[in-house]
Amino acid sequence: KLNGYLADLDEQAEEMFDNLIMQYKKAEGITEKLKADNQMQWVGLMNNIRSRAIEVVNIELIFV
């Protein structure tokens, strides 16, 4: 029973994380063109987005 609950929670967290990443990228205009033109800037922006998405997932799903 616990394994089923944890697997479901993991699936929800991954889906929420992926959706947040896409939303943040769109909102901030982070594109594949930026990745090709300025990789260091793209990596920095993506790391920032990842950190924010992880924090939101943890607050809303994990540490409830």
Image (spheres, helix red, strand yellow):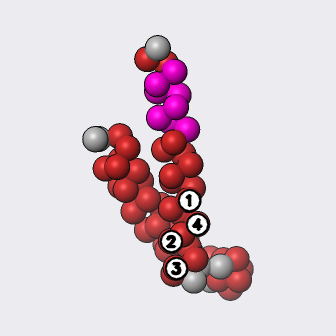
Residue pointed to by mark 4: 22
| Amino acid at circle 4 | Met
Numbered circle sitting on residue 24: 2
Q: CA distance from mark 1 to mark 3?
A: 12 Å
Comparing 35 with 10, the one in front is 10
Whole-Å distance between the Cαs marked 4 and 2? 6 Å
Residue toward you, 34 or 60: 60
Alpha carbon separation for disc pair 3 and 2: 5 Å
Q: Secondary structure at mark 2?
A: helix
**Magenta-colored stretch includes residue 64:** no
Check contact, mark 4 vs mark 2: CB within 8 A. Answer: yes
User: Disc 3 marks which residue?
Assistant: 27
Determine whether, in the image, residue 60 is placed left or right of residue 18: left
User: Would residue 3 be seen by someone viewing this image from the given angle?
Assistant: yes
The residue beneath circle 1 is: 19
Label 2: few (<14), some or many (≥20) within 10 Å? some
Residue type at numbered disc 3: Ala
Work out which quarter of the rendered image holds the C terminus and state it.
Answer: top left
Could you tell me how far apart the alpha carbons at marks 4 and 3 are, in whole angstroms?
9 Å
Mark 2 touches mark 1? (CB < 8 Å): no
Q: Position of residue 59 (x, y in %)?
A: 31, 50
Q: Amino acid at mark 1?
A: Asn
Query: Would you say the residues marked 4 and 1 are in contact, meaning their CB atoms lie under 8 Å apart?
Result: yes
Question: Would residue 8 be counted in the magenta stretch?
Answer: yes
Q: Earlier in the sequence, mark 2 or mark 1?
A: 1
| Image location (x, y in percent) of residue 44 | 49, 72
Of residues 20 and 52, the one drawn nearer to the viewer in this rendering? 20
Spot the residue most to the top: 1
